[in-house]
Image: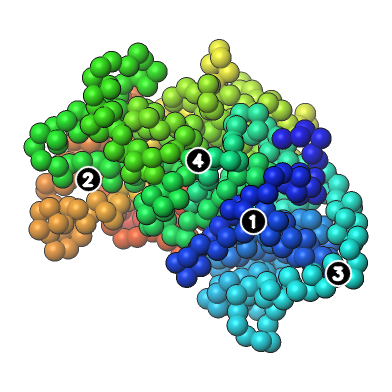
Amino acid sequence: MNRDIQSFADVYNNIHALPENTTFVHHRESDRWKRYSTTEFLTAIRFLTLAFAAEGWRGRQVAIAIAPSVDWLLLDYALMLCGAVSVPLFTNISTKNLRFQIDDADLHIVFTQTRAHEEIIHEANPAITCIDIDTTDQDHRTLETFLRAGQEINQKFPTRFDEILSRIRPDDLATIVYTSGTSGLPKGVELTHYNLISQLIDTAVKYKFDPKTDIALSLLPLAHIFERMVMHFYLSTGMSIYFADDVKNIGNLMHSVRPTVMTVVPRLLEKVWLKMHAKAMQSGPIKKIIAMWAFHRARHNDPYRQKSRLDSLLDSLVYRKLRDAMGGRIRMLISGGAPLSDDLYRFFLNIGIPLYQGYGLTEASPVICANAPGANKVGTCGRHFAHTEAKIDINGELLARGPGIMRGYHNNPQATRETIDSDGWLHTGDLATMDEDGYITITGRSKELSKTSTGEYISTSYIEQLLMASGWFDHVMTVGNNRPFVVALLMLDENVVHGLMKKHDFQDPQEAVHSGRFRKKVHHLIARINKKLNHWERIRNFHLITEPLSIENGDLTPSMKLAREHIQRRFQEEIEQMYTGE
């Protein structure tokens, strides 16, 4: 990417100069792909920018609350180009948090896609003007309404679009992105044009794509800054992009799209591994033994060791089929959002699917460090981005400084001062180490360091990662702060529960998970994990949870992380019983 690019106005012109791609961006409509060429995509942005500018939205916050799609990107680009501030909204958060975000961002206009989303927005604030992009109601404006209005403006004033773009400055506020708020109300992260552009420039240093051959399949919500930044990077290269319509349809989409690159979260990789493993275990006795051997070697062997004839044999018998199940052309999986277990990291590398773990946070736009081709070390989050500085302070906390660091928290100068010090260093809140080669490893959250009542420190995130690596749980939360020992709340994966019911003919989920057979398995799992822990960190008791957690009632954040304080309150009685029982 041209390093002279300073804003999304420059990105627009950069894409315009690229060769035409007739299969540029796609999303699903009525089980069919809706396709935009490069010219069609850029023309739609041009018309929407003109229409939004005519609405007088420059300097105003406007929210997007629709599903990930080409339409989402069109709205995002046009809002930023017209000088407005794009505010992504999750509508499946608690009404309390949604109301806070609407008030904090001073929102008056929200783009929605369904009547249900409109009702959720109006429940939080009836005064909001909702623009349903797909409605057939003649009295309501739609995306098409704005496209037509922009086209008319373009015909009458052909130079106006360039005039609007010329007003954009690198330090203009481009977006406010609300953090998950695992322990309270979310914070609005203010990111400028150049905050985001600096990420595109540094991403291009680490990762190389060929628009003639590379195809991206997008699975994650665009309201997450990680997927949003990556998507803008894909667009800047001119490569083809497909949006998944349903995460449950990923297997079919991989076969039909045959992507070469995807950004993922560890939980998705865990589910892919579980599905692969379950299918392999359904084979006949001989094939099952070979598969078990192959899976074990893939999870535990060094992926960079000298390959043997046995590795080649297992590749032809097992690993090649696993690659084919993911479309057969993956050359890059980039994982972020949560820690990736070393076993899972090794597995994908050993079966021939390049996997690269990175790390960042919304306040850094978002990537601070990442593994990449030619510089990939299992267990780490890679080296820092080219224009980002990183260091570990005396308390073991990771600090970062550079052009991607946020302007600050919206309407919250005190929180900004607490997060960015006078020298410009962002205090991430994450504990980390950095080896002699510059590879960064995240070891836990500083706020998640618990201290037992006997005075020993424990890293809850490390223990939880060990438990999650089993693949049995959707979420895990350990408790031990100011307590005599550690206990765990284990939220079971519904597929594990259903598999248990089917295998042992249980009729009720509670009967299945509280059976002596299953509890014995959990005890064995915890015993194995405890061997890796100091005696004061070891899990002494656990509680199994089968009821689903939801974003709507506050159990989870929009990024599907546990709202820890809420969970602790909700299961307070069960927690107390675990301590009473011991």
Question: Spatial distance from mark 4 to mark 3, Cα to Cα?
Answer: 39 Å
Q: Amino acid at mark 1?
A: Ser
Residue 18 is situated, as x and y percent measured from the top left of the image, at: 72, 44
Along the viewing direction, whichever of 210 and 8 lies nearer the viewer: 210
Which circle marks residue 37 in the picture? 1
**Residue type, numbered disc 3:** Gln
Cα distance between the residues tagged 4 and 2? 24 Å
Which residue is the site of mark 4?
261
Measured as percent of width and height from the top left, residue 183 is found at 53, 50
The residue nearer to you, when weighing 89 against 351, is 351
Q: Earlier in the sequence, mark 1 or mark 2?
A: 1
Tell me which numbered mark, 3 or 2, is placed earlier along the sequence. Answer: 3
Q: Residues within 10 Å of mark 4 (few under 14, many from 20)?
A: many
Question: Is the residue 219 above or below the residue 233 in the image?
Answer: below
Which residue does the image show at 61% across and 28% down from the upper left? 206
Q: CA distance from mark 1 to mark 4?
A: 20 Å
Residue 344 at x, y = what percent?
Answer: 36, 33
Q: Earlier in the sequence, mark 4 or mark 3?
A: 3
Residue position marked by numbered label 2 in the rendering = 279
Q: Residue at 28%, 42% (x, y): give it.
A: 276
Q: Which residue is label 3 attached to?
A: 155
Q: Secondary structure at mark 2?
A: helix
For badge 2, the amino acid type reads: Lys
Question: In which quadrant of the rendered image does the C terminus lie?
Answer: top left
Disc nearer the start of the sequence (1/3) = 1
Between marks 4 and 3 in the image, the one whose residue lies nearer the viewer: 3
Q: Residue 524, can we see it? A: yes
Q: How far, Cα to Cα, is label 1 from label 3?
A: 21 Å
| Element class at badge 1 | loop
Whole-Å distance between the Cαs marked 1 and 2? 38 Å
